[in-house]
Amino acid sequence: MKKFWKNALNAVLIILISGGVAAGVTAYVMKNKEAHNTFSEEQENTFKQPVHLTSYNGVAAENTDFTYAAEKTVHAVVHIKVMSTVSVGRQYIDPFEFFFGFGDSQRPRQQQRIGSGSGVIISTDGYIITNNHVIEGADSINVTLNDKRSFNAKVIGTDPNTDIALVKIEADNLQPVAFGDSEKLKIGEWVLAVGNPFDLTSTVTAGIVSAKGRSIMTGESDKDKIMSFIQTDAAVNRGNSGGALVNTKGELVGINTAIYSQTGDFAGYSFAVPISIAGKVVNDLKQYGTVQRAMLGVMIGDPEYVAKGKDTKIKELKGAYVDDFAMRSSAKEAGIEKGDVITAVNGNRVTSTNALQEQIMKYQPGDKVKITVDRYGTQKEFTVELRNAQGNTEIMKGGDSAKILGAAFKPLTDKQKKDYGVNYGIEVNNISKGKIQDCGIRKGFVIMIVNDQKIQTPEDFYSIVDKILKGSTDEKGLLIKGFYPNTGSTRHYAIDLID
């Protein structure tokens, strides 16, 4: 279980609620042309599951009989058990060993641990959505259905930035949950949390939506994290991570992720990733093998806070203040200026930096959005073409690459970079059958350089592999350089991609 500090003064924790330790504005969720469809025409739902969405034109949360929603959901929520290997004892990396690869630093003991959490079946062909922290670092993943059938699961993809992961089982007679529209949720609306707290399977609790677009502080770097949660008072505990948050119609509106607690157990507030975010993430993972992150190319802040300091001319205090621009900023090129307060995206009101993140997440690189800003009391509108982190509009495809490599990767956190003494690199998070396993790389290995290119993100690695597979480069394989954090030992591995 990961623990998150709310703040240092009262030592209140924000806690990821898995049952064990298995564990610019960046944007990526989904287009939403139709008001009640999680997946747009451009972003096709590739999962084999019914999307039955109900109109929200009436008064929200009229139905206070939860039996229908519970019956619709319990068979779609699964219990996830993971086995993982963790290092215990002192970890020390000798600088000489790190740079030159000699000797053997004090090696910690390896220990097997069992963790648990929840997941939600989202397709009839076995795709299951859960939290990244539930399956992170897992050696094996076992899924138990509500009817007591048990299956081994494989990881399709993970996204630490949203704490969302996609796994798959081979099973029949599955009952997926229908997607709802988290953007249409109203404060005070009834919701149900379904999961497996303390390994108590098929547990249903009820509460109301307490807030939307809520950010929470974690003990790690939140720089790249997506912080736009649904806050509820439905009781959730350890083991609920990855479980379903549904409305009274039995539609999935969020993935339960964290709790607000001083003790580690439920203390009144819980947080869920909106399905508008989670649905886009898993659809990208399935379709492309990696999440398509669209970016405005702006550095943002709270206008109310900024107005008290360096920019007292601000008139609009609700929105996202443009403090600066990225090097390749499509927003700047479109005419947006420092000091502008972004108030809407495609007509959808933006009242905070979190709300801006959530709106931009719906789109992919290459999409054009209308950005409304308040420029010291004057409203202006600009059309901005969103780009990816590389500064272009290409769709990044890691699907074929991920299958061939047979591994999942995650960027290093700021804390890991500090501990390891590096400023870039990705960690091998999970390994299945593929080239990574064949060449001898083990889980936990930190990849720093591939074919003389520094690797900052999994997408950087996939891009190199894709170019080789497409024949757009003379290279035929990979030369991977990195190290094992538990020993500091540097290693070189060679992989032939074109046999």
Image (tube, rainbow, N blue to C red):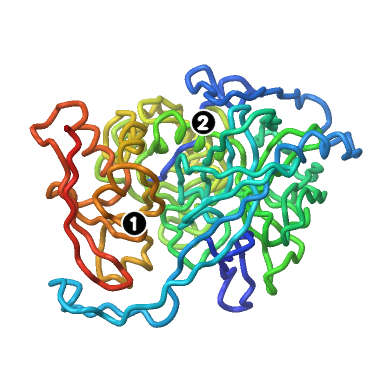
Q: Nearer the viewer, residue 91 or 14?
A: 91
Q: Position of residue 33 (x, y in %)?
A: 56, 21
Label 1 sits on residue: 427
Q: Is residue 322 left or right of residue 458?
A: right
The vertical placement of 369 against 426, above or below, is above
Label 2 sits on residue: 30
Pointers 2 and 1 in contact (C-beta within 8 Å): no
Q: CA distance from mark 2 to mark 1?
A: 27 Å
Q: For the residue marked with disc 2, what is the amino acid?
A: Met
Q: Quadrant of residue 233?
A: bottom right
Question: Residue at the spot x=31%, y=29% of the render?
Answer: 393
Q: Is disc 2 placed on a helix, strand or loop? A: loop
Q: Is residue 235 left or right of residue 450?
A: right
Label 2 or label 1, whichever lies nearer to me, is 1
Q: Position of residue 23 (x, y in %)?
A: 51, 60
Q: Could you tell me which quadrant the N terminus lies in? A: bottom right
Q: For the residue marked with disc 1, what is the amino acid?
A: Glu
Query: For mark 2, does the 10 Å Cα neighbourhood hold few (<14), some (14 to 19), or many (20 or more) residues?
Result: many
Question: Residue at the spot x=65%, y=42% of the render?
Answer: 254
Q: Could you tell me which quadrant the C terminus lies in? A: top left
Q: Nearer the viewer, residue 351 or 419?
A: 419
Q: Is disc 1 placed on a helix, strand or loop? A: strand
